[in-house]
Image: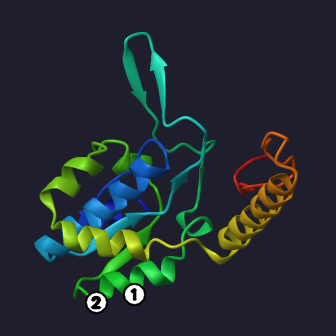
């Protein structure tokens, strides 16, 4: 989408780690619902270990880039989210992350969350369920952890060391 073809609606951006991104989506979607505006959901999810990197005495905000992001639908079940938003009577659209549009927006997920209705934000958070691919990964990890803990509990004299498994949590289509 070029900035010349921007549709009317509530645009927002996301930043930092999983919790900040989820709260940012929930707060902004709930705010759009409160205002009865169409919501334009950025199609990006920032991958990474640390949501904020210390830079001297200032915390650096992590924003989506080509290198650190994957499509939102790689992580969350978009259909479930869109169906939930529709129950509130507004339109929602997944829009490509466009630096010309999104980079100039403040990452104000928590402010949007505070300005929205908490019950609506809670419903949006509940609708942010893992995509099928991500759910399979979570199920495999959970199964491996349960098996590991069960084995270690049988031999309780040993400490609980994390299982070593070669599980790929994501495969970015953008990485070379």
Residue sticking out furthest to the top: 56
Q: Secondary structure at mark 1?
A: helix
Relative to 134, residue 98 above or below = above
Q: CA distance from mark 2 to mark 1?
A: 7 Å
Along the line of sight, which residue is nearer the eye, 4 or 97?
Answer: 97
Q: Residues within 10 Å of mark 2 (few under 14, many from 20)?
A: few
For the residues labelled 2 and 1, say whether their Cβ atoms are less than 8 Å apart.
Answer: yes
Q: Nearer the viewer, residue 143 or 15?
A: 143
Seen in the picture, residue 93 relative to 83 is either above or below; the reply is above
The residue lying at 35 percent from left, 56 percent from top is: 23
Visible residue check, residue 42: yes
| Residue 69 percent location from the top left of the image | 58, 49
Q: Residue 48 placed where, x, y %?
A: 60, 41
Q: Nearer the viewer, residue 5 or 161?
A: 161
Query: In the visual, does 102 lie left or right of 49?
Result: left
Q: What residue is shown at x 31% (from left), y 42% (from top)?
A: 104
Query: Residue 83 got which mark?
Result: 1
88 versus 163 height, above or below: below
Q: Quadrant of the N terminus?
A: bottom left
Q: Position of residue 53 (x, y in %)?
A: 49, 25
How packed mark 1 is, by other alpha carbons closer than 10 Å (few <14, some 14-19, many 20 or more), is few
In the image, residue 118 sits, relative to residue 12, either above or below, namely below
Residue 8 in view of the camera? no
- Report whether 144 appears left or right of 19: right
Image quadrant in which you'd find residue 90: bottom left
In which quarter of the view is residue 92 placed?
Answer: bottom left
Asked if residue 69 lies left or right of residue 81, the reply is right
**Where is mark 2, residue-wise?**
87
């Amino acid at each position: 989408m070029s900035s010349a073809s921007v549709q009317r609606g509530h645009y927002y951006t996301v930043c930092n780690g999983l919790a900040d991104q989820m709260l940012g989506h929930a707060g902004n979607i709930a705010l759009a619902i409160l205002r009865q505006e169409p919501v334009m959901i950025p199609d990006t999810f920032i991958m990474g270990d640390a949501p904020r990197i210390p830079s001297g005495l200032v915390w650096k905000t992590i924003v989506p880039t080509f290198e650190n992001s994957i499509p939102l639908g790689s992580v969350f079940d978009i259909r479930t989210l869109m169906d939930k938003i529709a129950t509130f009577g507004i339109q929602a659209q997944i829009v490509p992350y466009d630096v010309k549009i999104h980079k100039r927006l403040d990452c104000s997920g928590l402010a949007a969350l505070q300005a929205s209705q908490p019950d609506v934000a809670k419903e949006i958070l509940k609708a942010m369920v893992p995509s099928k691919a991500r759910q399979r990964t979570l199920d495999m990890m959970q199964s491996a952890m349960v098996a590991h803990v069960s084995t270690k509990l049988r031999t309780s004299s040993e400490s609980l060391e994390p299982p070593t498994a070669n599980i790929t949590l994501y495969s970015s289509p953008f990485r070379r």
